[in-house]
Image: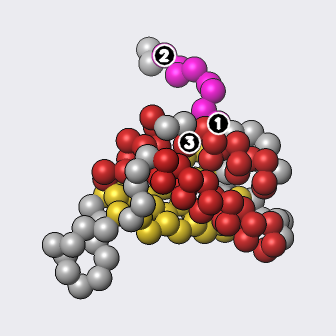
Amino acid sequence: MPHLTIDCSSPLAGLFERSGLLGELHRLVLQESRSQGVCKTWLRPALTYVGENPERHTSLVHVEVGLLAGRSNALKDRLADRIVELLQRHLSAAGRRAVIISAEVRDLASSYRLVPHHTAQRRVQ
């Protein structure tokens, strides 16, 4: 059930699909958070800039994990650390060393609702 949002510099987007990073990230999040179900992930490539000079392109990756409330801060801290380590390993293996990496693990709001859509559409007569 975890929700993952990956914001990254456009040139890095392909690494998430081709390298198996998403599969490994999903397994890590489910194992560490002790969540049931599957991860739902948004991958949002974007133009990114760091500092005051928009001509200087710096690659960024930020992973946000939303979990149902109830996990300890220690668990969330450990998961964020493991996500950063995983990203560092994959990005280094892909030859991407100059990347700013961050991760945040947070509780989903109490208003969070999930409704799987499995019903067939009714015919209009």
Query: In the rendered structure, which disc, 3 or 2, sits on the residue that comes first in sequence?
Result: 3
Q: Quadrant of residue 103?
A: bottom right
**Percent of width and height locating residue 78:** 75, 66
- Give the Cα separation between the discs numbered 1 and 2: 20 Å
79 with respect to 95 (left or right): right
Q: Which residue is mark 2?
A: 123
Query: In the rendered structure, which disc, 1 or 2, sits on the residue that comes first in sequence?
Result: 1
Query: In the rendered structure, which disc, 3 or 1, sits on the residue that comes first in sequence?
Result: 3
Disc 3, SS? helix
**94 in relation to 53, above or below:** above
Q: What residue is shown at x 54% (from left), y 36% (from top)?
A: 20
Q: Which residue is mark 3?
A: 22
SS assignment for the magenta stretch, majority: loop
Q: Dot 3, crowdedness within 10 Å: few (<14), some or many (≥20)?
A: some
**Percent of width and height locating residue 5:** 52, 55
- Looking at the rendered image, the disc whose residue lies closer to the viewer, 3 or 1, is 3
- Give the Cα separation between the discs numbered 3 and 1: 22 Å
Q: What residue is shown at x 53% (from left), y 49% (from top)?
A: 90
Disc 2, SS? loop
Under mark 2, the amino acid is Arg
Q: What residue is shown at x 43% (from left), y 46% (from top)?
A: 94
Q: Nearer the viewer, residue 68 or 124?
A: 68
- Give the Cα separation between the discs numbered 3 and 2: 37 Å
63 with respect to 70 (left or right): left
Proximity of marks 1 and 2: CB atoms separated by less than 8 Å: no
Q: Which residues are magenta?
A: 116-123
Under mark 1, the amino acid is Pro
Q: Is residue 95 magenta?
A: no
Q: Dot 2, crowdedness within 10 Å: few (<14), some or many (≥20)?
A: few
**Percent of width and height locating residue 71:** 82, 65
Disc 1, SS? loop
Q: Which residue is mark 1?
A: 116
